[in-house]
Amino acid sequence: VFSHVVRAPEDPILGVTVAYNKDPSPVKLNLGVGAYRTEEGKPLVLNVVKKAERLLINDSSRVKEYLPIVGLADFNKLSAKLIFGADSPAIKENRVTTVQCLSGSGSLRVAGEFLAHHYHQCVIYIPQPTWGNHPKVFTLAGLSVKTYRYYDPTTRGLNFQGLLEDLGSAPSGAIVLLHACAHNPTGVDPTIEQWEHIRKLMRSKALLPFFDSAYQGFASGSLDADAQPVRLFVADGGECLVAQSYAKNLGLYGERVGALSIVLRSADVASRVESQLKTVIRPMYSSPPIHGASIVATILKDRNLFQEWTVELKAMADRIIRMRQQLFEALRARGTPGDWTHILKQIGMFTFTGLNSEQVAFMTKEYHVYMTSDGRISMAGLNTKMVPLLADAIHAAVMR
Ligand code: LMR
């Protein structure tokens, strides 16, 4: 009965890892998926995560009962505090509902389904380009996806004018997906002044802000600085949604830990919205897993562990910045044609190199360097030893 089923294409991001794993070459480099690697090219479990896990294992009162549909209460409270700030009036006034979800993707999907059922406007604007999963998540949730201009390939920076024009002509009430910081895939973020401009425009047109916050702490190394755009929108008292992921900033990728927060106008609306989020979650996966959220809650509620986390997070962010410098220098040393300063200017895990899909295919075939076909490289996957290989590959691709 299933013989008619045709093979689906590999995922454009996760499929890069599949191809990389199949490559028998002893020297190869995977810069596809945005996952942090150490200078030795190994995945990293943060020390603070290991400590939290030891505390959890030694706590004999812990059981493996089902969590409530909305997840671990402590985790939800602390996640809201992390993104909105400890003094957030919205939190104090109980105008925020936070539900634990399956990392960033799960939070986006739950929000998408809620919006499709309970919001008057089913159009969501996503930046062009954006993370490849965004349009799929929202379309399957029942929203209608449109794009707004974001990236300018000539400057390899923000197309601020285009962004303002497109949001300015979006229908009133449309949902707008915004990357809170470290835009994926471009590494291009608005300045705080530009954010303020965007906020004013969006509020004047009653556009609904929906932040995807997958990299808090990774852009600047500071959790508070990276939350500024979100906090700007919350400070004006209006509604917004935030999908938070702990995959990158706590290295909890496979634990699938994240949260969806919705900021509302009153505590009463917040509690009704939460009741509806439960009706989305229960038939989808019943309730979220307990382990990862317990790790996060243990770290966020302990002053010392929290402090330790910020140090480890800053070290990851700094290593990525060093990789930017080393790659830039290596291209300069080779005299690779073109202006590569965007490698230094772009923010967060990714560099949007400007290499086209043929150049990417060439680098993979000839140099065993793996990346997404849009020319995005994960700087977090690079290390000093591999910089020459990557620079050689880019140089040869550009010189063809
Ligand atoms: C990425 O963009 O590489 C990450 O967000 C991982 C993913 O799930 O795509």
Image (cartoon, rainbow, N blue to C red):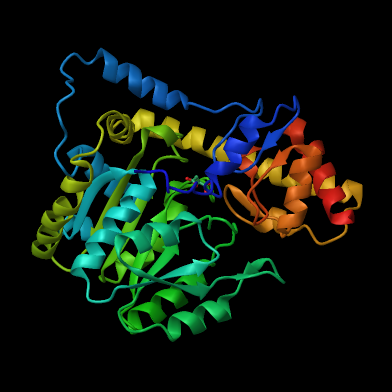
Q: Is residue 254 visible?
A: yes
In the figure, is residue 94 to the left or right of 12?
left
Work out whether residue 76 or residue 398 is closer to the camera in this orientation and state it.
398
Outermost residue toward the bottom?
169
Residue 84 in percent (x, y) is at 32, 55
Residue 196 in the image: above or below residue 298: below
Find residue 1 and report its image quarter: top left
Give the vertical position of 193 relative to 13 (above or below).
below
Number of numbered callouts drawn: 0
Q: Position of residue 387 (x, y in %)?
A: 77, 38
Quarter of the view holding residue 210: bottom left
**Residue 293, position as x, y percentages in the image:** 29, 34
Residue at x 57%, y 56% (from the top left corner): 185
Position in image of residue 356 (x %, y %): 73, 59
* Horizontal side of residue 48 vs 142, given as left or right: right
Query: Is residue 87 in view from this perspective?
Result: no
Residue drawn at 54 percent across, 67 percent down: 191
Q: Residue at x 47, y 70 (%)?
A: 195
Give left or right: position of 393 versus 115.
Answer: right
